[in-house]
Amino acid sequence: MRRFRRFYYDLFSRVYDGVIAFHSSDRAGRLRAWLVERAGVEPGMRVLDLCTGTGSVALEARKVVGDSGLVVGVDFSRGMLKKAREKAWGVEGLEWVEACAPFLPFKEGTIHVVICSHAFYELKNWEKLWTLAEVKRVLVPGGRFCMMEHEEPAHPLVRFLYKVRLASMGSWNSERFVAREQLLFSRFFQKVTKERSPTGSSKLLVGVKG
Ligand SMILES: C[S@@+](CC[C@H](N)C(=O)[O-])C[C@H]1O[C@@H](n2cnc3c(N)ncnc32)[C@H](O)[C@@H]1O
């Protein structure tokens, strides 16, 4: 199944940014800037953008960490990482790593902030749990994990399509996860908070490593 999902994203990478720009009401990327701000990213930090896709959030975080910081974008799709590298051509302080979310190739306690935008729900149940544990492992004490996800669409047809998409990614039990995500986060992180994005279409869960 993971091979299928990687293949899907390798293909999708060719049109991903265009599709997002077409569908999103947030063409100026304000949502990403808001995410980076709410994630508490500051100059000099080491930030991990998990499931980075074409690297848009990583690029936004790079603007904030500056030359003394580092942003690493991780994804399991070579196609997505290729696009990210092209977009970030010439930008220093950005690294792209091909890896799977539940197996992060970083040392314990080395990252200040981990961000995961619109990707966590697609992970299978065991992957979600392992990823939460891995994120906690790589974070410094007091480091933050920020997960942004779509709010469940209100329109019945769009909601149906949203659920079909999650299921087609192999994540049959995402609905159960959504219902108790805050509780699950609390098993790994402290001070767990949840808020709606200014666009109203996404939500942000933040947890702090104790
Ligand atoms: C919907 S895209 C989101 C990309 C980006 N975070 C954004 O907000 O535009 C989901 C991304 O998660 C990646 N992904 C899905 N499952 C993954 C896994 N198990 N490990 C690493 N990356 C994964 C996909 O390759 C894809 O690039």
Image (tube, helix red, strand yellow):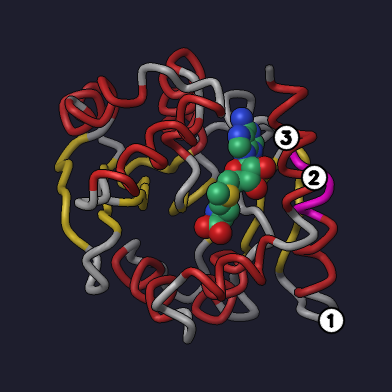
Q: What residue do we see at 34% from left, 51% from top?
A: 150
Q: What residue do we see at 50% from left, 28% from top?
A: 123
Q: Nearer the viewer, mark 1 or mark 2?
A: 2
Outermost residue to the bottom: 28
Residues rendered magenta in the picture: 77-81
Q: Please, what secondary structure does the residue beneath circle 3 have?
A: loop
- Give left or right: position of 194 versus 88: left
Q: What residue do we see at 77% from left, 23% from top?
A: 3
Viewer-nearest residue: 39 or 76: 76
User: In the rendered structure, are the residues bearing label 1 and label 3 in contact, judged by CB atoms less than 8 Å apart?
Assistant: no
Give the residue pinned by disc 3: 99
Q: Is residue 33 visible?
A: yes
Say if disc 3 is inside 8 Å of ligand 1: yes
Q: Please, what secondary structure does the residue beneath circle 1 have?
A: loop
Amino acid under disc 1: Gly
Name the quarter where the C terminus is drawn. top left
Give the residue pinned by disc 1: 90
Q: Image quarter for residue 136?
A: top left
Amino acid under disc 2: Asp
Say if disc 1 is inside 8 Å of ligand 1: no
Alpha-carbon neighbours of circle 1 within 10 Å: few (<14), some, or many (≥20)?
Answer: few
Q: Position of residue 141 (x, y in %)?
A: 35, 41
Closer to the chain start, of discs 2 and 3, is 2
Q: Position of residue 19 (x, y in %)?
A: 61, 66
Q: Which mark is residue 10?
A: 2
